[in-house]
Image (cartoon, rainbow, N blue to C red):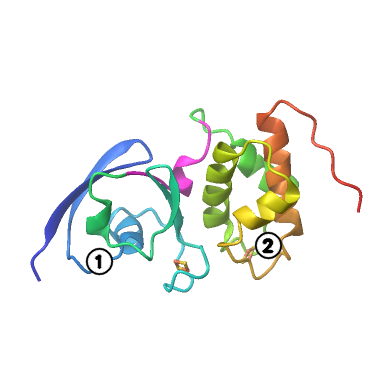
Amino acid sequence: MAKTHVKMKMNGAEVEGLVEPRMLLVHFIREDLQLTGTHIGCETTHCGACTVDLDGMSVKSCTMFAVQADGADIATIEGVANPDGTLSALQEGFRMMHGLQCGFCTPGMIIRAQRLLRENPSPSEEEIRFGISGNLCRCTGYQNIVRAIQYAAAKVNGAEFKEAAE
Ligand code: FES
Ligand code: FES
């Protein structure tokens, strides 16, 4: 099958490749670019494990063809840490609040939460739960994921993280 040349920005760096029109964006990211932090769970737009940030939106990369991302500006979990290599507020939040167990959902969850906090730096618990409703986690019961995002929001806002009373 004829291949198409695509070029895009990935975590700040220009990348390019030759792809078949049927190649999904997540396969281009994982197989051609070797950025395997973006996971594949369902390949049917349900689980959110493949979530990336694309031109300022959370996108399930199993739901797009790589050719559709030509010219896009994309961020994956590999680009989430601070420039000096230290953990971002969200990564720290997931670590401190035990926001993961198997970790399979975590890259997509963190990428989604990063966009959520950019759109709404002080979300309520309800807004967090709604904001991550496209990302499924089979392990944690979500409670610690919500706390991790609240931790990150407090840190980004220079506030002290206070856990809500149970
Ligand atoms: S792998 Fe894309 S939503 Fe599940
Ligand atoms: S930590 Fe296992 S799926 Fe979320």
Mark 1 crowd level (few <14, some 14–19, many ≥20, 10 Å Cα) = some
Name the residue furthest left: 2
* x and y, in percent, of residue 39 in the image: 46, 62
Check disc 2 and give the amino acid type.
Answer: Gln
Q: Secondary structure at mark 1?
A: loop
Magenta stretch encompasses residue 128: no
Magenta-colored span: 73-82
Q: Nearer the viewer, mark 1 or mark 2?
A: 1
Residue 79 or 4: which is nearer the viewer? 4
Q: Secondary structure at mark 2?
A: loop
Mark 2 crowd level (few <14, some 14–19, many ≥20, 10 Å Cα) = few
Q: Is residue 60 left or right of residue 138?
A: left
* x and y, in percent, of residue 163 in the image: 85, 44
**Label 2 within 8 A of ligand 2 by Cβ:** yes
* x and y, in percent, of residue 86 in the image: 57, 33
In percent of the image, x 53 and y 44: which residue is there?
115
Residue bearing the label numbered 2: 101
C-alpha distance separating marks 1 and 2: 31 Å
Choose top left, top right, bottom left or bottom right for residue 10: top left
In percent of the image, x 86 and y 46: which residue is there?
164
The quadrant in which the N terminus is found is bottom left
In percent of the image, x 59 and y 37: which residue is there?
87
* x and y, in percent, of residue 22 in the image: 22, 69
Mark drawn on residue 23: 1
Label whose residue precedes the other's in the sequence (1 or 2): 1
The quadrant in which the C terminus is found is bottom right
